[in-house]
Image: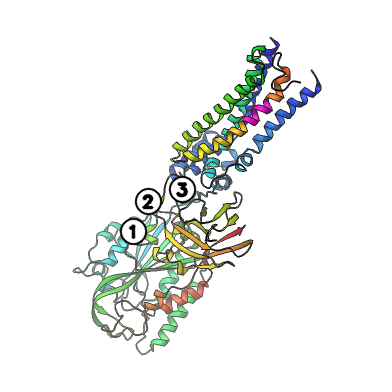
Amino acid sequence: MKQQHYIYLALGIAATILFYVLRVQAYEVLYSVPGFSDQFYNAGLYDMIPLITIVVPWAAAAVYYFAINSVRFDRWYHWLLVGGISTVITPIIGYSLNQSMFSDMGLSYGAESAAFELVNMLWAAVMYVIASFAMRWWSTNCRHTPIPQ
Amino acid sequence: MTIMKHFISLMLLLGVFTLAVTSCGRSPLDKAVKSALVKQDTTQAQFDSICSIIKQNPDRYKQYLDDQGQVDVAQLQALIDQVGADLRPPIRWDIARYGQQELSLTIYFERSGSMVPYDNAGDRGQLKKAVNDIINHFPGRKVNINIVNDGIYPYQGSVDQFIKDRNIYASTAGVGNSAFTDFQQIFGAILKAQDATNVSVVVTDLIYSPADAGDVSIDKILNEENSLATSIFRQYKGKSVLVHQLMGDYNGKYYPYTNRPVEFRGMRPFYLLVIADTPVMDRMAAQGEYTELLHPAAVRNSYRFNQSETAVDYCVVPDWKDNAGRFRVDHKDPSRLLKCQGDKNTGVLCMTIAARLDGLQKDEAFLANAQNYKLQSVSGFELKVTPITADMITGNNKAYLDGKTHLLTLTGKMNGPRDQVVISLPNEMPAWIAQSTTRDDTNPAAAGFSTTTLGLREFLDGIASAFGAGGNYTTITLHLEN
């Protein structure tokens, strides 16, 4: 295994940790609404939603490269399909969690929560790309997907 | 197999990352405090629940326990302040009250000649009702009653007997000398006897009736009264005095300063003077259990002497119907408003502050009147004050409005890149004191006889002079930047 691959893995992990450390700023620079953002912060959702946004894309990438790991599915659009599923699932889980917690707190921010999850889709996609480039080198059949080495 | 090892390794890595992130979070104590603050559940029950978490884990939370194994309220307050400061908007929960000693109440019931007509069998008995209400609603169990005129005499019956007594002046006839009221003796003894957990209430008509004053001019008597008040209270600068004016039926002989009694039937003012150490008065003001003492139901006017400036809880409501233009509240400093921009069409910037003003011990009419506030800003903002009502509070604005009493709405156009808006509520002697004062009480048919008290202003000016008046009840400063 080339040393360069370990550098990709290290960079991927570092970028993911950095995203988690700077999660509040990462989200609020793209979406911040008076009232909603404060409640989101108080409810601890800036801790939980980014965690989902990391775990789901990384798990999806791991499933693609190591569980699916087949020459039948080694085209870029296969990779994109898994990424798409991950990018849709992540905000759905986030929205459900968000609404469940807000409902318990007696808050109703349905539209804002949905808009927030649209932004979260972007971060979920970014995480999927980061995870893919961090781990693809160890896949036996899909290491050339989406871009050949 | 190797590929499955990679997969399993990655899944384990993700699991470890998730566990690390979730377990590196706050302790159960931190979570309980945060939950209480976020849900605005700042009650005695919640405090007890938090204490039980500490006591169940004495090793883990030993810094929150004192040598006797009891919860160190100061340490816990520091944690609550820290957690509360990290919320949006920052939330404060004063738990100091839970570790404090119970307060005691001492009633000093004036029994001078001019007081007797306040409690006739055929009248409504507002004076006795006001005293009974204070005793009945006082949360502490220790209550003492004294009769005062030329001196202080313990009431011989029980508290229950006092409350039931339909003719308190008849049953206390012969106690002391009701011909004159010695303020120096009474207030000197009250202030001297009072300890740090006592609240004293003097029930009086506040008419200074010194002995041997028959040939003395009214000016001399009132000047003497003024000097007397100053000389007594200046020795106790750590005390606060809350003066309540109430009205009661009066039917009988009234003793003017000339000491030639006249018959009067009608309403007359009487006063409840609540005296306590300033921290005790602040403590009562911060709690909800002392309403009857601080705001009696039948109170007509009130004023507290020696009220220090209080920092009130407030927050800018980011999303409110009256808001216009744009601004963003700084998460680190809620008094800073960033990116302030007026409305695109009108240029008007309007922001709403929710503030808790009930701790200032001012009546609603005073607090809701924007004329009583002083506003300083370069841009010339204007202020509107609106009481918060239950129907204004919704799930989404609960975090901002819950526990607050008034909305302070600022409207204006920013003239420059930054501005500082200072909203203050000046502490000035209220107009009712002058309006309730007379220097001649010899004619019961005179206009204003039923609403004025001889030498009230002089006596209260004397107290103000002893404590030093002025300053503000509270100040809120906002820093605006665009």
Relative to B388, say whether B37 is above or below: above
Q: Chain of mark 3?
A: B
In magenta segment, residue B408: no
Instruction: Check disc 3 and report its element: helix, strand or loop.
Output: loop
3 and 2 marks in contact (CB < 8 Å): no
C-alpha span from label 1 to label 2:
33 Å
Residue located beneath label 1 in the image: B135
The mark nearer the N terminus, 1 or 3, is 1
Residue A14: percent from left, percent from top: 72, 31
In the displayed image of the protein, which residue is found farthest to the right?
Answer: A3
Q: Is residue B192 above or below residue A68?
A: below
The residue where tag 3 is placed is B397
Q: Verify whether residue A128 appears in magenta.
A: yes
| Residue shown at the point (45%, 53%) measured from the top left | B321
User: Which quadrant holds residue A63?
Assistant: top right
Q: Nearer the viewer, residue B8 or A113?
A: A113
| Amino acid found under the numbered disc labelled 1 | Ile
Picture quarter containing residue A77? top right
What crowding class fits label 3: few (fewer than 14 Cα within 10 Å), some (14-19), or many (20 or more)?
some
What's the residue type where badge 3 is placed? Asn
Give the Cα separation between the discs numbered 1 and 3: 38 Å
Segment colored magenta: A125-131
Residue B180, percent from left and from top: 34, 78
Q: Earlier in the sequence, mark 3 or mark 2?
A: 2
Dominant secondary-structure state across the stretch colored magenta: helix
Is label 2 in a helix, a strand or a loop?
A: helix
